[in-house]
Image (cartoon, rainbow, N blue to C red):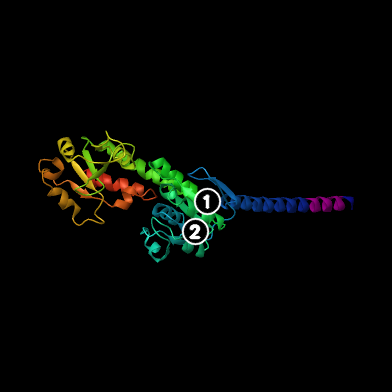
Amino acid sequence: MKKLYSLLLIVLLTIGALAGCAEKKDQVKEDNKASVGSKTEASFPVTITDALGNKVVIEKKPEKIVSLMPSNTEIAYSLGLGKEVVGVSDFDNYPEDVLKKEKIGGQEINLEKIISLKPNLVLAHASSAHNSTEGLQQLKDAGISVLVVNDAENFDQVYDSISMIGKATGETKKADEIIKGMKDDLAKIIAKTKEIKVKKKVLVEVSPAPEIYTSGKNTFMDEMLSAINADNIASDQEGWIKIDQEAMIKRNPDVVITTYGYYVKNPTEQVLSRQGWESVNAVKNKQVIDVDSDRVTRSGPRIVEGVEELAKAVYPEVFK
């Protein structure tokens, strides 16, 4: 009888132990789920130091966003925030959905319109913030968080812009994914330039004759040309400069890139028929190509597409 009681006690203890183990496993699973969830869920409020050095506190994930600059808009859309964007600038044209959004002005913003949209967040831009100091302050006084995004002049600064907007909107993970994708794509383009045997000389025209402007050193375009292993023939000058046509003819570019085809009819034909340029290699060999201005000048997620477009224009034999 004693043996029976002992056996029964052992069975009961075993069942209890197994039940305890199962409960612990279930608890571990729940803890793991909670842990995974906490990694993907953004926590608010967040404090961000913007491009002007202001500390901007965003209390909760923005449900309504107004963008004052096309590059900010493209970043927001790439982060999956198309529905949250309720207002955009007059210059916005991509993606197509922005054409349906409320317009809030161009160089001069419509403050009443912005406030009427009741945004939680306004994405301003350092390139124009100095012209809108009073207006941006009025938005802040109306209780709207205003974040001034940096005016990116190189790839790293574009990544910073994406990261900043990602943090402000609770989309840091998505922002990291976009940045990684851009870096990977850029690395592939740079790796392909190793196939280039002879470096080409390139002139980039950002405005047509008679006042032709180009990009010198310390410009994004100069960095993009370096990335594709091409020589910018204006790299001995600083910033955006009006070109001396005689000097450019003497430098004899192999390729001329124009970026103004969106507002000038037949831009390549204008260069090919330009008086005095008949002896220039780019003209003789008809290596004058117009590229999508937005892709090569808008400091957002599509800028690497712009690099690839430049690469195909300058080295079509390598970048097919």
- Of labels 2 and 1, earlier in sequence is 2
Q: Is residue 176 above or below residue 63?
A: above
Q: Which residue is mark 1?
A: 168
Whether 233 is among the magenta residues is no
Q: Is residue 30 left or right of residue 315?
A: right
Q: Which residue is mark 2?
A: 65
Q: Taking the image as drawn, is residue 302 in sight? A: yes
Q: Is residue 312 left or right of residue 66?
A: left
Query: What segment is highlighted magenta in the picture?
Result: 3-13
**Relative image position of residue 29 (x, y in whole percent):** 64, 52
Report how far apart the C-alphas of labels 2 and 1 lie in the structure: 11 Å
Q: Is residue 120 left or right of residue 196?
A: right
**Residue at the spot 18% in from the left edge and 51% down from the top edge:** 268
**Relative image position of residue 270 (x, y in whole percent):** 16, 51
Residue 247 sits in quarter = top left
Dot 2 crowding, Cα within 10 Å, few <14, some 14–19, many 20+: many
**Residue at the spot 80% in from the left edge and 51% down from the top edge:** 13
